[in-house]
Image (cartoon, helix red, strand yellow):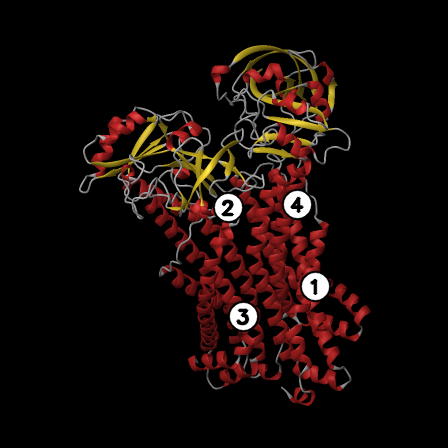
Amino acid sequence: MLRTALRNVLAHKARLIMTALAILLGVAFVSGTLVFADSTANALRNASAQSLKGVAVSVRAEAATTATDAAAPDAAAPGMAGAVDGRQNSVLDSALVRKIRALPGVASVRPLVHGQVTLAGKDGRPVNADTNRQNLATNYQPGQDGKDGKDSGFPLEDGHSPLKDSHFPLKEGRGPATADELALDAQTSAKAGYRIGDTVRFATDGPALAKKLVGIVSTDNPQVTAGGTLTLFDTRTAQTLFHHPGRFDEIAVAADPGTDAYALTDQVQALLPDHGARATSGAELAAEQSAEIAKNTGYLTKTLLVFAGVALFVGVFLIANTFTMLIAQRSREIALLRAVGASRRQVVRSVLVEAALLGLVSSVGGFALGLGIAAAMGPLLNTTGAALPDGPLVITPAAPLASLALGVLVTVLAAWLPSRKAAKIAPVAALSSVDQAPPARALRVRNVLGTLLTGAGVLVMLYVSTLKTSAPSNLMVAMLGAALTLLGVIALAPLLSRPLITLAGRVTTRFFGVGGKLAKENALRNPRRTAATASALMIGLALITGLTVGAHSSQQAMAKEATQGLTADYKVNYGTARGLDADATGELARVPGVAAAAPVATAQFDTHGESAVITGTDPKAFGKAVRLDFRAGSPHDIGPGRIAVSDEFAKRAGLHVGATLDAEMGGGMDSGNAPNANKTNNKNTTSTASKNTNSKKLTVVGIYAKTRTVDEALGTLDDVLPYSVTKQLDRLLVKAEPGRAGGLERKIRAALGDSPLLKVRNQEQLVKDNNESVTTVLSMMYGLLGMAVAIAILGIVNTLAMSVFERTREIGMLRAIGLDRAGIRQMVRLESVVISLFGAVLGIGTGTFLAWAAGGLTTTSMQEYETVLPWDRLGTFLVLALMIGVLAAIWPARRAARLNMLRAIQST
């Protein structure tokens, strides 16, 4: 029987090629993910090791974040990844550096300053302003004598050139030495269009600055090589920009050979103040980074493996379909084996061995293809700002073993039911037919099971539609409901195929005549086979449709929230926590073409046991920039000590027009980049700067409908600005004069100093910025689910090709009674199109239902959310299904049309 299995694989290799491709693609996805995860983790560990090379002890200000970034640790200088904008309270100073340098066993000390710098390109546009890539900055340290870098404690690789820092090898020019100089990495200088001697414009947290470019360096920092920027200053200048003079973010300590690093760490810790800094040995820091790397790469690996699992699940349908058809076609052969003494168990083993051989060979090819996928994943993810370092592919024994085992296991499991069917073939009964319809009883059992699963799934999803938060428990319930619904629809697909394909057949018969009618009858001949073929496409389209409907609905809600009630033409703010100066309002008001400039500041206040955020503005200018729906009172009544509140906050706090409240003002909010960002109504919310808290009597003079553009309360700028965190404006809302909004952006930038951090966005850009993250995620999901759709296409090709083989005599008879080759091709194409459209209708319908039911989970975080169907995209999916049907039929239709009529009639 083993020889029989091997002979069957070799004899039917042409019929198994599509199945082999499906297994190959699924295994390639899995193996590529595993190799990519191992390679990325190895590259990150290498980058971490490079950043800690020669570091015996690292001293870090506790206000700084850890050196290990979620995506990649710094590979150029220890701690750079921990840069935090505007940090001012580091306890690491020059005196501490001198004390550490004086300890026995210390070879050298390298004090580091980190920050963020946004560059303006030579064309004036901000570099990386609209991306998630890091814009890093640090201090360039040549050494005590400015020449040899000895004070850094790290060996030089390129001699003793003037003003050199071994961490940043010079490619051109020299290192920065004075307050009016800087250096850039080579990639950044090329991207921004700068050369040695050019004046570089940049910003750290607000106004634009300018310095001369004196050096271009190279770096292997993964955040930079992945598209970020690196700007270097001399130490004094870096301290001035990011701290008070004499302060550092980190101190890297190198030890003499033979020094106990742990003992040295204890000695350094003893020199530190009780709070504000921590000393960590290089070995301990490396272990922490390694654990963090494993944790973060684990998240990514699990996500990718989920989509790989979807692709393999789709492949199961193709495999099961193939073996079912092969067994039906080989029923006479199996019957003869039974007649000469083969037992049922031997028949089962023969089919499973055949499946195992197919799975093994396909998995080997899949693993090889997976290496290419692994090599492409890093650059692809870096286009989204992942900042993954370059490195060689790492193939651990686990990756190929897991890939091969998974491929064989999935193939064998998919072939198990067909093998049992083969074992039940009676020696005599099987000699009379090649393709028998499935027993009616089996279909009835399947229909009952499908009805129960679908009913349970629908009930669960209807319950999910009543939930309002995306708590983990609610998400698990939604996933359960979606899985039950999908499994139920798959089980019911044979039952659903008859009415839907009959309906499609009326269209094909009307427009294509006999060919259309034959296509319908062929599709209905074996409902199980048609359902299995369509289900593979249905799963992929259901997931894609669900994601598309959910994403489109979210984008519509976010667009409403971004511009709700906003009549201003531009929103102006900085891209950092820094606010705009109060005099910016007057500067913009004088710009030609500006009708009104409304200043906006926010602060937090407590009253009646509730915490809320109040927006301060110039009521007259604000009325031109924002449209509020007042339910009581009037916006014209707002003035000193007089505020309006939202209807929701009025209800919570028991307020009404005329009510007087004692507000504990203070704390405020960080100057946001989007209105009402990260605000909360929680009673337990406390001020982040309670020292600013002051009691203030306020009178409610108006109540307006809640909107995302305005916070819970609205007052004058003078009542709010003194209690804001930054004592600066969060943003400015600019209303242009009629017909003059088009060219106003450049004028606004010029009036405010044209800082690279300055954001001047119209309503269209606000919507685009809000939707950008959703669009990026959706595009990635499309790419990941594309593998499942590709496997589904192979399934259609495979089913049609094997169906043509089964119907060889039938096709010969059709040719004999007058159907020409074109008619045969048309019949096969229409059959393919009908099956594809059946799968598409099931997938789009199921995906839309799941997206609607799960939409309620976003209600709390996205109050404007409602399910909005993207009809254009749904129509595109149907058109794509039509094209898939046409393309999938090219080879089977051509093969059917080329059959020799006489030989086909004589076939058995």
Q: Decide: marks 1, 2 in contact (CB < 8 A)?
A: no
SS category of the residue bearing label 4: helix
Calculate the distance from the C-alpha at mark 3 to the C-alpha at mark 4: 35 Å
Residue 707 versus residue 425 in the image, above or below = above
Q: Residue furthest front?
A: 197
Calculate the distance from the C-alpha at mark 3 to the C-alpha at mark 1: 22 Å
Residue 586 versus residue 209 in the image, above or below = above
SS category of the residue bearing label 1: helix
Q: Decide: marks 4, 2 in contact (CB < 8 A)?
A: no
Q: Say left or right for 334 vs 620.
A: left
Calculate the distance from the C-alpha at mark 1 to the C-alpha at mark 2: 36 Å
**Crowding near pointer 3: few (<14 within 10 Å), some, many (20+)?**
many
Q: Which residue is identified by label 3?
A: 19
- For residue 326, the mark is none
Calculate the distance from the C-alpha at mark 3 to the C-alpha at mark 2: 37 Å
**Crowding near pointer 1: few (<14 within 10 Å), some, many (20+)?**
many
Mark nearest the camera among 1 and 2 is 2
Q: Position of residue 369 (x, y in %)?
A: 47, 65
Q: Depth check: give the residue in front, 455 or 505.
A: 505
**Crowding near pointer 4: few (<14 within 10 Å), some, many (20+)?**
many
- Could one spot residue 810 in this view of the protein? yes
Q: Earlier in the sequence, mark 4 or mark 1?
A: 4
- For residue 385, the mark is 2
Mark nearest the camera among 4 and 2 is 2
- Quadrant of the image occupied by residue 438: bottom right
Mark nearest the camera among 3 and 2 is 2
